[in-house]
Amino acid sequence: MFPGDILTRRLHVALACAALLVFTWLAERHAGESVFLEDQVDQLQNFESLLQWRPEGLWGAIMSGTAPPAHALGPLGAVVFGIPVALGLGINSIHVITSLLIAIGTASVFAVLARIDAVFAWLWLLIFSFTGVVWWNAGMLWTNTLLLPIGLTVMALAASCLRRPCLATLAWLVLIGTFGLQLHLVAVVAAPVILVLVFVTGRDARRHPPGRWHLCAIAVVALMAVGPYVMAELMTGFRNTRAIFTHLESPGGRAAVSGTAASEMPLAIAVDPAGLFERLGVRPVLVITIGTALGIAALALLALRARRGGVDRTREARSESVLFWLTVSAVAGIAGQGLFFAWMARSFEGFHHVTLLAPFYPLVPAALVSLAMPRRLPPFTTACALGVVCLALLVWKGPPVGDRFVERTPWSYSRIRAALDAVCGDGAVETDEGHGFAARLNPQYDSVLRYLMKRRLTTCRYQPGSDTLIVAARDGNYRPSHDVGGVEYRLELVMPPGIARYRRWR
């Protein structure tokens, strides 16, 4: 290797580290500012139930719109939420950790792609960094945002397995997909990606079985992936499985729409990850049509280049074959996601429904741009030029793009705690909590304010029947008097974002 090549590669590594550090900073900018209400407190108490081996802790979170209530297939979300609090790191540390997992997953995918094609890796990072789904997840304190690190891990393993087929990598790929189901059943959309990888690499992977200790580790993790759910179902007579099938037999439920309408938004987001067509005012149906055409074109052009892989064993030819099959898996996953929503016939209810495959969305546009770029310069020289562009755009445009997709709320943990401390100090209080605060998902759990008081996360102390009543309502509108069980309380004080103190009147 010539001295110039060494300098270029060192520059490439420096640019990659700088860009990924900026990405991490962007991911952490809004940590601690997210909503902290029933969904979050429910998961924290699920972790407490897990330590007591109760079914609510062994299952995952309750999925919205299911009747009877259906849980996800395991406690991953509760574990990620509960451990930092159990270690005394505080509530806001959870958000720091979940956003950091997104940054780590992004760095892992970039590192794997850079070993395959450095130019393609930068194009992927550039498009992924301007995908709205990414920053929505980074700004949310919610277990479903863990679907993005799961998706990033799936993609890193998929690219690694295509580059060097290995039975252990395939096993980890399946296990990571299973852990996605512990967060939400929508993670089933990873199945087409996994099936493509098994089909393409299965034969070669069998020639490289895992070692004994590696196999033991896979077995232990497999037990963690399915064991808690099986235990909970045995304890409850398969109650959750029956609830899931009941929900599947009545697709759509209260939010039923036509299959075409249900798949429209997920497909539009997938084929236009950076929202370029959306900002131009193009209708979703036309966006999907354009995206489909671009996907077909990308696969056709990549297939033409990848054909050389059969006779040409150069590194470039092998890389083109890997990128072709990686793009095939992306197209298969996006198509499968569209079919899944069409079958479920449910209206689109948020970015968490399309989060897991978000790392795969930039593959088609990245492939097309990569194919269109002239390769007159050495690959790492071109990659460094792209690295400079990517780094500059992350610093310049990254903050406003991230801010545009972050959900603003006054109901963060820090603000709620500060309001509680202000309205009641270290006094003993009763609470009456409205929608978003009351424990409606699991009525046996504590509501939001009672959770904070009982775990001594605020100076207030909870005491049933106290003369002082703390009332929480998301709209912040309070009447002069408030009745609880026939007892009348009079309003004394309201503190932002909307915590009120009442005093017993009679």
Image (cartoon, grey):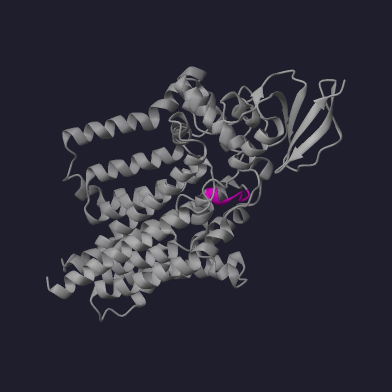
Among all residues in the image, which is located at the extreme left?
A: 1
Q: Residue at x 53, y 43 (%)?
A: 141
Question: In the image, which residues are magenta?
Answer: 347-353
Judge from the rendering whether residue 395 lies leftward or rightward of residue 424; answer left or right: left
Residue 193 seen in render: no
Q: Where is residue 374 in the image (x, y as percent from the top left)?
A: 31, 80
Q: Which residue is drawn at 76% across and 32% down?
A: 501
Judge from the rendering whether residue 174 lies leftward or rightward of residue 403; answer left or right: left
Q: Which residue is drawn at 29% across and 41% down?
A: 171
Q: Which residue is drawn at 19% across and 44% down?
A: 206
Residue 330 seen in render: yes
- Depth order, front residue of 146/254: 146
Q: Where is residue 491 in the image (x, y as percent from the top left)?
A: 83, 33
Q: Quadrant of the N terminus?
A: bottom left
Q: Position of residue 129 (x, y in %)?
A: 45, 62
Q: Is residue 87 magenta?
A: no
Q: Position of residue 196 (x, y in %)?
A: 34, 52
User: Eyeballing the image, is 24 above or below 87?
Assistant: below
